[in-house]
Amino acid sequence: MTWFKSRGSALACAALVILNLAVYWPVVGFGFVDLDDPAYVTENANVASGITWRGAVVAFTSITAANWHPVTMLSHMADVQVFGLWAGGHHLTNLFLHIANTLLLFGLLRRTTGTFGGSLFVAALFAVHPLHVESVAWISERKDVLSTFFALLCVWAYVSFVRAPSAARYVRVVLWFALALMAKPMVVTLPFLLLLLDVWPLNRSAGDTGPRCAGDTGPRPGAWPPSWRAGRPLVTEKLPLFLLAAAASVITFMVQDSAGAVGSTDRLPIGVRAGHALLAYWTYLRQTIWPSHLAVFYPFQEGAISFTWAGAAALGLAALSALALRSGRRFPFAFTGWFWFVGLLVPVIGIVHIGNHWTADRYTYVPIVGLFLVVGWGVPAVLARWTMPRLVLPAAAVVAVSACAIVATAQVSTWRDAKSLWQHALAVTTDNYLAHGTLGALLVNEGRMDEGIAHLNEWRRLRQGFAVVENDRGDVLARQGQLDEAMAHFAQAVKINPGMPEAHVNLGFALARMGRIQDAIRALEVGLRLEPNQPEVRCNLAVLYHQQGNTGEARRQLEAALSVAPGYPRAVRMLADLAKGGG
């Protein structure tokens, strides 16, 4: 990495590391939060065993939180192997990965553009932009920082391939891309990004696909925009990458659809989704420029989607896209930067609607780098025609980065514990049912019953007709012994969301308590098909099979429980009892 050998680059890297530590070091003292962290780490029996061959197999053959990302799960296992369940260690891994990504981005831009100031400015914004706090401070977003780490290594390998093509170098590109996809499939757009980089800064889009020299970033003579004839070899060159991306997209959709995470077209018609996508782009633009009122969850706002606003958003995006295309000959960085932002958000912009959120800060982790490029190279290019003191631009850059760092530091503090996280979400959003429901449960567990119940009542009001509400209502009724009413709510939850494993499991438990053993077995088996890593559910299912006299199936369920949670005490005891009974 010759870019690192200069004294200036070394000092810049040191400054970027210090900047990251200054903003994010407090996370080392933070704990786990109740959003996804239990599913990924604290209550995941497979992860709790650390690195094992059996755990690796489960990571590649099962889904977690409606996602298939085995490399991410292996990283969580490695953390448990090293740190146990000390949350600070898990936070440290996220932080170190983010620092590595910052340095890789700086080095990549420095290497391909030959521009020091712009590269440092973009990397510094990447380090401390408030929208990136979620990806770093949330342990469950390991998939974000890890997939980006592999994606940046893929781009590094691609640049090496471009400058000295060989089969071995291309294989490295493919391998890094595969690892990135298995960490988080949002990086399916990486082949598209490589095509943008071919335009700028690699300048391969005018029919010259040969090696490039560092700093040679000006536009090539020739027609603009690049013709298909000139660009076809660049697309053909990336066909293996596009095939990998297509396979990952299909797998991800199937996994999330089977888990009930994909919104149906009945509830969200394609017109609503298109309107949401158009408005979401402007939300991300606004938050990039003015990052305020950031929260861990933004509830979906169907009322915010109107034909007028969607049409205005479409016209605005079309105008900006046309401007980026038109200016591509003179300012190729504007073309690459703008379509970097637009293109990399496509998988999560809402056409395929996942979950019930409007937007998510974590989705901007890589896409907004494109906007940083437009500013980092565009402002100096526009101001070059005016004479001004040399320190004006560096001073403005320092002010912008410092402002981001101050806001990001405040945002980091909201992640210190679950209560702070959800209280902040309620303070900066409206009708946030998830914040009400989660905070209410936390307050009830603390014994602050009146406050907790008030939040839970608001949660129920906002979530009428949702599976999670029906399931939780049934759970309360079951605890009170009202099994008939509880079962009706569990059945309704299953009807609303057939891919919700906890609803099937709760229905099975209620049926078992009512003596309907065969129906209970069927419900529990469905719940285990949706989420196999539930050793306690398998133990209960074994009890039901044993009551029917089917000791063989009971033993199989207990062995399956031990396969996902080696040494699980209840399963061990029950297997010993079966052995004593000669079953």
Image: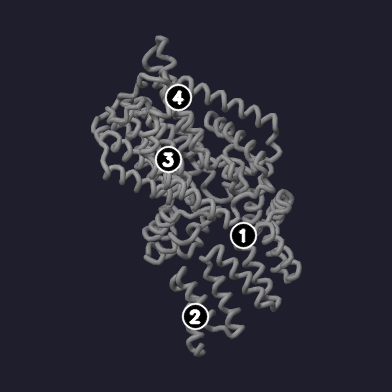
Disc 4 or disc 2, which is closer to the eye? 4
Q: Residue 153 at what x, y percent from top left?
A: 34, 42
Tag 4 residue: 334
Q: Residue 283 at what x, y percent from top left?
A: 59, 33
Q: Is residue 479 above or below residue 122?
A: below
Other residues around mark 3 within 10 Å, as few (<14) / some (14–19) / many (≥20):
many
Disc 2 element? helix
Other residues around mark 1 within 10 Å, as few (<14) / some (14–19) / many (≥20):
many
Q: Residue 230 at what x, y percent from top left?
A: 38, 28
* Amino acid type, residue under disc 2 in the picture: Arg
Other residues around mark 2 within 10 Å, as few (<14) / some (14–19) / many (≥20):
few
Disc 1 element? loop
Mark closer to the chain start, 2 or 1: 1
Mark closer to the chain start, 4 or 2: 4
Tell me if label 4 and label 2 are in contact, CB under 8 Å: no
Mark closer to the chain start, 4 or 3: 3
Other residues around mark 4 within 10 Å, as few (<14) / some (14–19) / many (≥20):
many
Q: CA distance from mark 2 to mark 1?
A: 30 Å
Tag 2 residue: 573
Tag shown at residue 190: 3
Q: CA distance from mark 4 to mark 2?
A: 65 Å
